[in-house]
Amino acid sequence: MDQNIFDSFGGDGQISDLIDQFYYKVLFDQTLRGKFLKADMTRVRLQQKTFFAQMFGCPHTKYTGKDLIEVHKNLNITNLQFDRFLHHLKCILSDMNKPSELIDQIIKKVDSHRKLIVFE
């Protein structure tokens, strides 16, 4: 994605809102909740916000967290769980009144990371 996507999404504030809403939904989803029960959610949210900002093309953000494979390799995340992740993300983007073309681009970009997160 490029700078225009970051700007058209609404910048850092909108990314922050997206991630906060996302983890609220995830923690009530019985399929996903267990993956986060022992996690430091403040840190997880911050890392995810940084990762999404970089992925959206933010010029002043650089994700410096652990490699995605390293973070996820022992979590046993399934394709079903990753699909639930995408479902919640898509619903929130829709609730935020983002254009469908933008939603599709974001979902496609996030899904392109599946092979770094799912190991089944």
Image (tube, grey):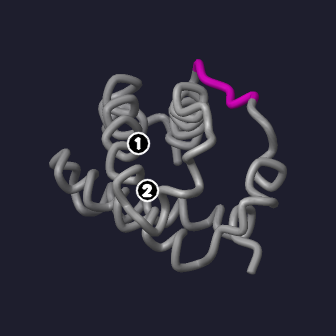
Q: Position of residue 96 (x, y in %)?
A: 19, 45
Q: Quadrant of the C terminus?
A: bottom right
In this orientation, which residue lies closer to the viewer: 49 or 32?
32
Q: Position of residue 67 (x, y in %)?
A: 81, 44
- Work out whether mark 1 precedes mark 2 in sequence or the reverse, and give the earlier one: 1
Label 2 SS: helix
Left or right of residue 63, residue 74 in this image: right
Provide the residue span drawn in magenta: 60-64
Q: Position of residue 87 (x, y in %)?
A: 36, 67
What kind of residue is marked 2?
Ile
93 magenta-colored: no
Left or right of residue 90, residue 55 in this image: right
Q: CA distance from mark 1 to mark 2?
A: 9 Å
Residue drawn at 69 percent across, 70 percent down: 118
What kind of residue is marked 1?
Ile
Which quadrant would residue 66 be assigned to in this image? top right
C-beta proximity under 8 Å, tags 1 and 2: yes
Label 1 SS: helix
Residue drawn at 52 percent across, 79 percent down: 80
Q: Which residue is mark 1?
A: 5
Q: Is residue 109 above or below residue 118?
A: above
* Disc on res. 35: none
Residue drawn at 52 percent across, 48 percent down: 1
Q: Is residue 40 above or below residue 94?
A: above
Q: Which residue is mark 2?
A: 106
Q: Is residue 41 above or below residue 113?
A: above
63 magenta-colored: yes
Residue drawn at 80 percent across, 60 percent down: 74
In this orientation, which residue lies closer to the viewer: 112 or 40?
40
